[in-house]
Image (cartoon, rainbow, N blue to C red):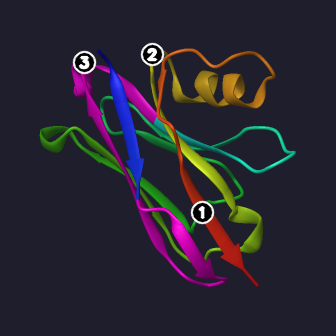
Amino acid sequence: QERLVESGGGAVQAGGSLRLSCTASGYPFSSRSMGWFRQAPGKEREGVAGIATDGTTVSADSVKGRFTISKDDAKNTLYLQMHNLKPEDSGMYYCAAFVGTIRAWLRQVMSPAPLGGYKGQGTQVTVSS
């Protein structure tokens, strides 16, 4: 059965860094594009970044220059390195596996419709000012 497990969240002060990890199992990891999205209480989902099977990445404007998405196919693991964190980055961070283009997935994340593909249970990131 497909499973995604996120880790690495925590509480940091503004300007700090965290690295999130997402370990996948139950399906061929390298066959799916992967992404991170986040959601804060009372707010809509927000796409953070995606990485295609060939390693191409797309990041949201709000995190460009601060966050880097990467993956290790040999370890079935997706990463999100976050630097210069801001209070508005706080929220639950989820990883997801999907098919199709990254930009289409990011649009789906931003829509109110249920999100297809595989998703993890999330890891909490809290950034204090």
- Of residues 109 and 103, the one nearer the viewer is 109
* Classed neighbour count for the residue bearing mark 2: other residues with Cα under 10 Å, few (<14), some (14–19), many (≥20): some
Confirm whether the magenta stretch covers residue 15. yes
Residue 27 circle label: 3
Residue 85 circle label: none
Q: What is the three-letter code of the residue carrying label 1?
A: Val
User: Based on the displayed image, in which of its 4 quarters is residue 26 positioned?
Assistant: top left
Task: Looking at this view, name the residue that lies furthest to the right.
Answer: 42
Provide residue 79's location: percent of width, then percent of height: 37, 52
Q: Which residue is mark 1?
A: 125
Q: CA distance from mark 2 to mark 1?
A: 26 Å
User: Based on the displayed image, in which of its 4 quarters is residue 22 positioned?
Assistant: top left
Q: CA distance from mark 2 to mark 3?
A: 13 Å
Judge from the rendering whether residue 128 lies leftward or rightward of residue 59; answer left or right. Answer: right
Q: Which residues are magenta?
A: 8-34
User: Based on the displayed image, in which of its 4 quarters is residue 14 positioned?
Assistant: bottom right
**In this view, 114 is above or below 57:** above
Q: Which residue is mark 2?
A: 99
Judge from the rendering whether residue 76 lies leftward or rightward of residue 4; answer left or right. Answer: left
Q: Earlier in the sequence, mark 2 or mark 1?
A: 2
Q: Earlier in the sequence, mark 2 or mark 3?
A: 3
Q: What is the three-letter code of the residue carrying label 3?
A: Tyr
Q: What residue lies at 58% left-to-right and 79% top-to-bottom?
A: 12
Quadrant of the image containing the N terminus = top left
